[in-house]
Image: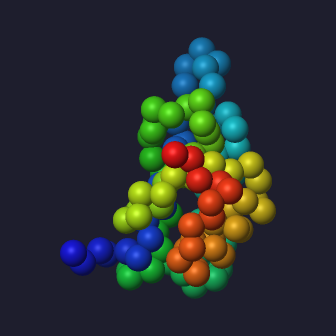
Amino acid sequence: MNNHFKHHVFFCLNQRPDGESCCQDKGAEAAFDYMKSRVKKLGLNGEGKVRINRAGCFDRCELGPLLVVYPQAIWYTFVDNEDIEEIIEGHLINGNVVNRLVVE
């Protein structure tokens, strides 16, 4: 199988109506912006490398905020930019799953 990207990262950026809990309310947009800019700054973006994308609801709101890295299908939660840095360094650069942030 030939993947266009080594890692394809999707962030849930869904906003639920009526104040229901969602990833958007837990800082997902800021984390998305941070990861996208860091990946670009580090020269990790582009064909054969890393792509950061927006996604709709993953239907796992209670576990959020969430992102998922393909093709490995590793689901992560995160709290702050330090967690995002750990995912970039550990998973996207070195290919190691960041176990403490994994959501089963």
Q: Is residue 20 above or below residue 71?
A: above
Depth order, front residue of 56/64? 64
- Residue 88 appears in which quarter of the rendering? bottom right
The foreground one among 68 and 55 is: 68
Q: Is residue 35 visible in this depiction of the protein?
A: no
**Quadrant in the rendering for residue 42:** bottom right
Colour convention of the picture: rainbow
Return the residue nearer the eye: 68 or 57. 68
Answer with the quarter of the image where residue 25 lies. top right
**Picture layout, residue 39 above or below residue 16:** below
Horizontal relation, residue 10 to residue 89: left or right: left
| 58 to 20, vertically: above or below | below
User: Which residue is at 50% across, 34% downward?
Assistant: 60
Residue 75 position, x and y percent, is 51, 52
Where is residue 7 drawn, in percent x and y? 44, 71
Query: Which residue is located at x 59 percent, y 53 percent?
Result: 102
Point out residue 22 in the picture as x, y percentages from the top left corner: 60, 31
Q: Residue furthest left?
A: 1
**Looking at the figure, which quarter contains the N terminus?**
bottom left
Residue 71, x across and y down, in percent: 37, 65
Height in image: 25 above or below 90? above
Residue 96 visible (yes or no): yes
* Residue at (76% x, 53% y) in the render: 80
How many labels sit on residues?
0
Q: In percent of the image, x 61 and y 39: which residue is there? A: 64
